[in-house]
Amino acid sequence: MADSSGKKKPVGAMLTWGILSAGLYAAVFLNVKPIMNYFTAVDGLQMFEKFIRASALVALAIAFSLIYGNFAGTFWEVVGIQPKKKEAGKEGA
Amino acid sequence: MAGFTGEATKGFIELTPFVKAFLPTLGFFGGLLSGFIGSGGAFVLTPGMMNVGAPGAVAVASNMTHKFPKALVGALKRKKLGHVDVLLGLVMGLSAFAGVQVGIIVQKWINAVWGNAGTNLYVSAIFVIVLAVVGTSVLRDAYRSKNNVGAVKKAGGFAERVQRINIPPMLSFKTAGVRVSFWITVPLGFATGMLAATIAVGGFIGVPAMIYILGTSSFVASGTELVIAFVMGLTGAFAWALGGFVDIRLTFLILAGSLFGVQLGAVGTSFVKDYMIKLIMAAVMLTVMVSRIVAIPVYLHNLGRITLNDALIPVLKNVSFGILVFALLGSGLIILGAMIRGRRAEAEAVGAPVQVSR
C-alpha cells in the first residue's frame, strides 16, 4: 500500500486539482441557466450550430472529468488507497 | 427549475436538495461498480435519475455523457493493473459506434410516437429482459467458478470453438491472450452499442461476450469494457447532445461522486478473485431487474394502457426506488468489504515472518 511503498504523498497535486475542480464546478452551477439553454435549446438550429454546441458539451465533460479525476486519484493516494502489488494481468488475487 | 427553453418539451427536472445529495451518492456507488466490474454503474444511474423524475431519454443521455469521461479515468487506472486490452477495446468500441447510432434512432422514434412515457416503458422493458437473461447466466457461472477456481479461468469450450473459426482477418489480442476473427468481434461490438444506446449499459452484453464468446478473463473483460464504454459513450453522448437531451447539471452531479468511485472500484479488483467480479455483477443485475419490474405498471398507466389506483402509484415508485438503493448499497458494501479483507490479508502477509498465501 502507499504507506509501505515509501512514496511521497501527492498532497500539493491533490490541492491544485481540487481547487481547479471547484472552480470549474462553480462556474457551471453559477451560470446554469444560460449554459442549460445553450446545450438544450437546439430545436430549429442549423446542423453546424448543433454540432458546435454538442462538441462544446463533450469537451466540457472531458475537461471536468480529467481535472476532477486527477483530484479523485490523488485524493485516494493521499489517504493510502492503492492497488495491491502483483504481477500485471495475472488472474486471481 | 424554471426558465429553460427545452424544459417544457424534454422535461428537465428541478434540482431539489435531495437530488443534489442523491445523485453524487448514486454516482459514487455506480462508479464503484463500474471500476470493479467494468460496467454496470449506468444500470443503477439511469433508473436512479428516472426515480427522481428525469424522463427516460434525458436520463440515458445525461448518463451516457457522464459515462464516457468516467470510463476514460477508470480505463487509465485499470491499464496500470494490466487489465486493459486496448486493441480489443478499440475494435469492439468502434463497431459499437454503429450499434449506438441504430439504438438512438430507435429510441428517438419511440419518443416521437409515444413521448416520455413510451421511452420510460421501452427502457424499463429492455432492462428487465436483458438483466433476466444475462444475470441468471452470469450468476450460474459465478457459482461454478467459485466451486472450481482455476478450472474456469480460461476460455470455455464454446470460446475455444469460436477461436478456431478462421475467417480472415484474424486479430491477436495480446493482453487478453486470444486470437479471434474480426467478423466475430464486430457483431459483438455492434450488439454492445445497441444496448448501450438503449439503456446506457452496453457492458451487460460486452463483458459476458468477451468472457464466454471470446474467452478472456473477467479481469481483462471488465477492464477492456471501459475502453469500449469510452468510445461508444463519446459518440453516443454526442448524438444525444445534437438533439439537446443532455442535462449537464445531472451529468456533473453524478461525476462528482462517480470519479471517486470508479478509481476505488478499480483498486478493489486487485484484492479479489475472478469469480467475485461475476458474482457481484449477477447479484446487482438481478436486483435491479426486480426494481424495474415493479416500476413498469406505472409507465403502462402513464401510457393509458392500464389504470392504477392513484394511491398505488407512489407506493410502486417508492418500492422500486427502495430495491434500487438496496442493490446499490449492498453491492457497494460487498466490494468495500472485499477490499478491506484483501488489504488486511496483504498487511498480515507483509508483517508475518513466513509468507502466507491467500
Image: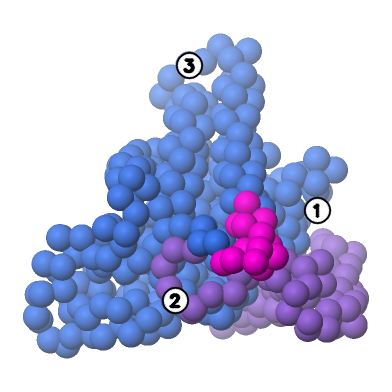
Q: Which residue is mark 3?
A: B307
Can you tell which mark lies on residue B3?
A: 1
Secondary structure, mark 2, is loop
Most foreground residue, A14 or B259: A14
Q: Is residue A42 left or right of residue B240?
A: right
Query: Would residue B54 be visible to someone looking at this image?
Result: no
Task: Please give the range of residues in magenta.
Answer: B341-355
Secondary structure, mark 1, is loop
**Chain of the residue under label 2:** A
Q: Amino acid at mark 2?
A: Gly
* Of labels 1 and 3, the one closer to you: 3
Which quarter of the picture shows residue B323? top right
Q: Residues within 10 Å of mark 2 (few under 14, many from 20)?
A: many
Q: Which residue is mark 2?
A: A89
Q: Amino acid at mark 3?
A: Thr
Query: Would residue B336 be visible to someone looking at this image?
Result: yes
Q: Colour of chain A?
A: purple
Q: Tell me residue B260's x, y (percent).
A: 71, 63
Q: Is residue B117 left or right of residue A75?
A: left
**Chain of the residue under label 3:** B
Above or below — where is B283 with respect to B176? above
